Each structure stands twice: as structure tokens, then as C-alpha cells.
């Protein structure tokens, strides 16, 4: 693959920082207001798989979801409309458009790979677009739903473990 020439520094400055701090902070306030706790910001998760099964896409060594609910295994990614190529709001600069197309495509590819690997490891991934925060209640509902499912799953796992007692005869693993 040919290296693609980067944009001029002046253009780069407009888009500095992949993270959308304002969006993240808005979500922080939202989580606090709804008393959702147990999360850490930018907690680094090590990914042990090197390639994605079937596609063979290479997996980055780490990912840093914007919000990690470690115990619940829920990762929340806040995607900036520009950097992650939102179909509705991503407007590419007219200069060096080839560079930006490539860069954003790479980000999107990485988003997909990371989500696949996390899900295979039992995580729930909630993606929140920057524009989704215009309807904050919906974002909270999606996060809460993921957390609730995780609680249910853990409760089920616990029941399963308890049922494994040699003193309780179970005919089927499922109720
Ligand atoms: Zn958008």
C-alpha cells in the first residue's frame, strides 16, 4: 500500500485529538445524574487475540473504551461524528480528502474489530454517537439496558453454579 501524504499542519490542527472531550464530559454528567456508577474512563483493556476469526483482520493490542464498567463487562464508546465517519455529519475537508477517507476508514475498521473481540470475550459494547447526545435519555436507556442484561447474566451463572451441587438432581441445565 502506498503511503498517503498527510494534510497540512493547519488542517490537522482543526481536528486535533481523536477524542471528543465535550461529548465525553456530557456523558459523565449524564451517568452521574442517573446515579450509574462502577465505571472508569479510558480504562485500558488488553486484547489477547491477534486476529479476528473468519476475517483474519489484525487486532490491536489494547483498546481504551471511553467508559468501562469493569464488573458488568460493559464498554461504552463515544464516537465523534467526524473521526468515526458518521453518515449524517461527517464532512470531509476538501483538501487531502484521500488522506481523510483513508484515516476515517481505518478508524471504522478498528471500531469493528475491537467490538467483535470484546463481544467474543463476553463484553457488551454500547456505541454512542456524538449526535446521540442530543437525546441523552435514550443514551442512558441503552447503557442501563446493557448493565441490566449483565446483572441478569451473572445471576443466571450463579444459579447454574448452585445447581451443580451433587446433592441436587437436575434433569436439564435450563429451566
Ligand atoms: Zn453524527
Image (spheres, rainbow, N blue to C red):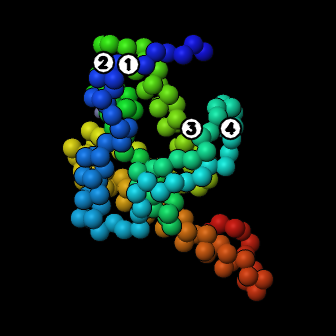
Relative placement, left or right, of 158 versus 137 is right
The residue indicated by pointer 1 is 7
Residue 154 location (% of width, % of height): 55, 69
Q: Disc 4, disc 2: CB below 8 Å?
A: no
**Horizontal side of residue 131 vs 65, given as left or right:** left
Residue 145 visible in image: no
Distance, label 2 to label 1, CA atoms, is 10 Å
Which one is earlier in the sequence, the residue at label 1 or at label 3? Answer: 1
Q: Is residue 140 left or right of residue 167?
A: left
Q: CA distance from mark 3 to mark 4?
A: 9 Å
Q: Which residue is mark 2?
A: 93
Q: Residue at x 42, y 14 (%)?
A: 98
In the current view of this chain or complex, which residue is farthest to the left? 134
Q: CA distance from mark 4 to mark 2?
A: 33 Å
Q: Are marks 2 and 1 in contact (CB under 8 Å)?
A: yes
Ligand 1 - quadrant of the structure image: top left
Amino acid at each position: 500500500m502506498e503511503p498517503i501524504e498527510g494534510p497540512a499542519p493547519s488542517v490537522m490542527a482543526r481536528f486535533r485529538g481523536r477524542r471528543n472531550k465535550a461529548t465525553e464530559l456530557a456523558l459523565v454528567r449524564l451517568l452521574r445524574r442517573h446515579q450509574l456508577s462502577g465505571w472508569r474512563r479510558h480504562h485500558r483493556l488488553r486484547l489477547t487475540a491477534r486476529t479476528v476469526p473468519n476475517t483474519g483482520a489484525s487486532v490491536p493490542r489494547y483498546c481504551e473504551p471511553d467508559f468501562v464498567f469493569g464488573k458488568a463487562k460493559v464498554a461504552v464508546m463515544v464516537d465523534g461524528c467526524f473521526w468515526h465517519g458518521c453518515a449524517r455529519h461527517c464532512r470531509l475537508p476538501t483538501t487531502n480528502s484521500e488522506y481523510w477517507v483513508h484515516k476515517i476508514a481505518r478508524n471504522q475498521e478498528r471500531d469493528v474489530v475491537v467490538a467483535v473481540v470484546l463481544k467474543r470475550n463476553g463484553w457488551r459494547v454500547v456505541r454512542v454517537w456524538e449526535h446521540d447526545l442530543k437525546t441523552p435519555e435514550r443514551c442512558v436507556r441503552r447503557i442501563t439496558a446493557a448493565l441490566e442484561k449483565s446483572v441478569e447474566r451473572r445471576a443466571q451463572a450463579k444459579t447454574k453454579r448452585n445447581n451443580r451441587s451433587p446433592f441436587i438432581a437436575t434433569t436439564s441445565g435450563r429451566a
